[in-house]
Image: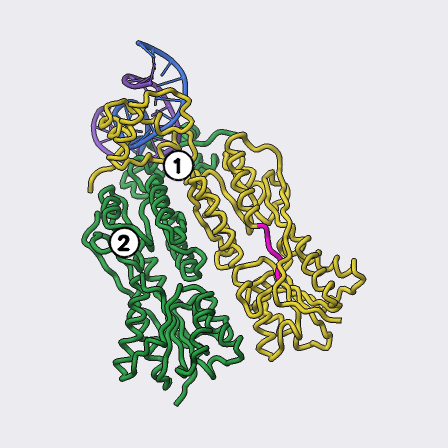
Chain colours: A green, B yellow, C blue, D purple
Amino acid sequence: MRTRVTIRDVAKKAGVSISTVSRVLSPQANDYMREETRGKVLGAIKELDYRPDIRAQSLRGRGTRIVGLVMPDALNPFYQELAYVLEEVCYREKYGLLVCSSKNSITRELTYIDLLESQKVDGIIISTVGLKEIKLNNLVKKGIPIILMDRDVPGANIPVMFTNNYLGGCQATQHLIDLGHKKIACIAGSMNTLSSINRLKGYTDTLQKNGLEVDKKLIKEGKLIYKDGYKLMKELARKSSDGFTALFCLNDLVALGAMRAIQEDGKNIPSDYSIVGFDNISLSSVSNPPLTTIAQPIKQIAQGAFRTIKRWKKQGLLKKEHRFWDTKLIVRKSCKEIN
Amino acid sequence: MRTRVTIRDVAKKAGVSISTVSRVLSPQANDYMREETRGKVLGAIKELDYRPDIRAQSLRGRGTRIVGLVMPDALNPFYQELAYVLEEVCYREKYGLLVCSSKNSITRELTYIDLLESQKVDGIIISTVGLKEIKLNNLVKKGIPIILMDRDVPGANIPVMFTNNYLGGCQATQHLIDLGHKKIACIAGSMNTLSSINRLKGYTDTLQKNGLEVDKKLIKEGKLIYKDGYKLMKELARKSSDGFTALFCLNDLVALGAMRAIQEDGKNIPSDYSIVGFDNISLSSVSNPPLTTIAQPIKQIAQGAFRTIKRWKKQGLLKKEHRFWDTKLIVRKSCKEIN
DNA sequence: GTGAAAGCGCTAACAC
DNA sequence: GTGTTAGCGCTTTCAC
């Protein structure tokens, strides 16, 4: 096992000093430099297959070129796709992405924050389950850029990237109403996150705006997982005296679960029930039938978060910045016009 | 933005030297130390909310506590679950996991390897799409532990963690045969990976072992993705004069696609076709019907890879180590006994 | 244009 | 038991 090749080895082989090597490594070298020298160095680098040590660079003030992503549920396709998109953004900028699943545990979340802090990552992007204002502000004081996604923490002076969940709720509901549905049920989340609350509010507001009644019995709360979608749909169907014809699910996983329940009972989608989901996970385009849903602006969120981190690193934290991106209705085959 | 708190700050606040602080930080401090001193230091650490800088530690010979995972397709649920399990393993040991999707591009793969090298990660776990022996051996020379998953690179002196794909192919096929099926079709991968080849070999060998004919027309090759499963099943069904009653799909994604095709044609699973998949992705337990499949030993692979890295770091690379773990048949509802 | 040297935050001899 | 110091690989003044 040969030992590591360092900047010194390159310098020696090229017959120059290490500072010269360092200079050719630096892109923003506004330094002049003889072409011949640069050539020699480049040659030595290639010959030795040298890679600068980012840790050492970062000790001298450059960043670590790592950003951390902390998400509550790495098994949820939505977060998986978010991670995927974010990784792509990082890749283009030659950053690494350290993924951390808090698994909805606040202890895990804190442990991960610790780890990321120790790793001196250039930034943390988090959909937090339990970070408090004081902790967040501490992180900021320590100079660690941290970006919230989807969940705000009141009082914390931190940028947040939001999906316009309210709009999404409106779009989904309005779509169903436009198709002629009057009785629209809803399978909602457990109302402990802003995003669920806003999606539901979009739903109720839109009903009312269209002169439709909000029927509490048609709104079911549960976890936003496949299993609960299945279970709650069964419940809804059991007392189907209410006779709803359409269903808005707060995410696609739930919608898929509900679809399963419906089909299991021998009913058809969209003939018997029209369904709209939320998230536009890749699964929903290949379900049977393909699911009409609300697409979240994950590309924009990922880009926005990353850019905010870079700006923060460079210019410091400006002011609290809340960014909302709009959702988009994706029409597929799970809804049907009625009259 | 307050400046970073370092070991020096802690030392000053505790009224000791930095080496004393360093000692309380080191777990393996076989050093004696007055309890009072340790207390003072611990107090200062807490008060200042100090986190040791792993970069600096690693410069002094400790590892970076980061391992890199390079996978060909981050959208494939199998790799997602592998990443998930590996992250858990890392978490327990306080390591970070840097995830890299090569997207089946060899350029991307090499770029990522470069990045991981620069980051001086403690190890790389990779399911490679195109790494060559020479590159691999170079990495080893540089002292970077690298573990192959699922795909071997002949000639490279690198540990490999394998699923016993051959066994899996046998188990799947035997299960169908045991249920009375005689004509068993197969949707295979594109035969450019060892795992596909071995799964298929398990299939053909098992057929023959049971005195059944291997019918080339019943074997379809494609990419191991949902879309191809759908498409190839349609093809198979079109010339169903061959009259097969069962189907072995080389992964679950393909099986799910095939199921969709079957159901779209008004046929039933398992009445008309029995299906076995491969991977046991979480989706397959909630499909309709739930899919009988072959579970890969992902926990063992993740554990094995991680442990091998740690051992390598400590004792150097021993000898080429090939490890096989067995698959397991998971019986659900997609198969039916016939006679 | 290029080199010498200080120092980023830390650990590990080596003193005492 | 605890402190002093050299040095990990690098960047960045400051000389020349």
Same chain check for tags 1 and 2: yes
- The image's mark for residue A53 is 1
Callout 1: chain: A
Residue A265 in sight from this viewpoint: yes
What's the mark number on residue B175? none
- Alpha carbon separation for disc pair 1 and 2: 26 Å
Tell me where residue A53 appears, x and y as whole percent.
Answer: 39, 36
Classify residue B89 as left or right of residue A93: right
Residue A314 versus residue A153 in the image, above or below: above
Q: Are marks 1 and 2 in contact (CB under 8 Å)?
A: no
Give the magenta-colored segment's residue range: B292-297
| Residue nearer the viewer, A116 or B122 | A116
Vertical position of residue A15 compared to residue A53: above or below: above
Magenta span includes B295: yes
Q: Where's residue B303, x and y in %?
A: 53, 43
Question: What percent of the width, then of the height, locates residue A177?
Answer: 34, 82
Q: Amino acid at mark 2?
A: Thr
Query: Tag 1: Cα neighbours inside 10 Å, few (<14), some, or many (≥20)?
Result: some
Foreground of the two, B70 or B209: B209
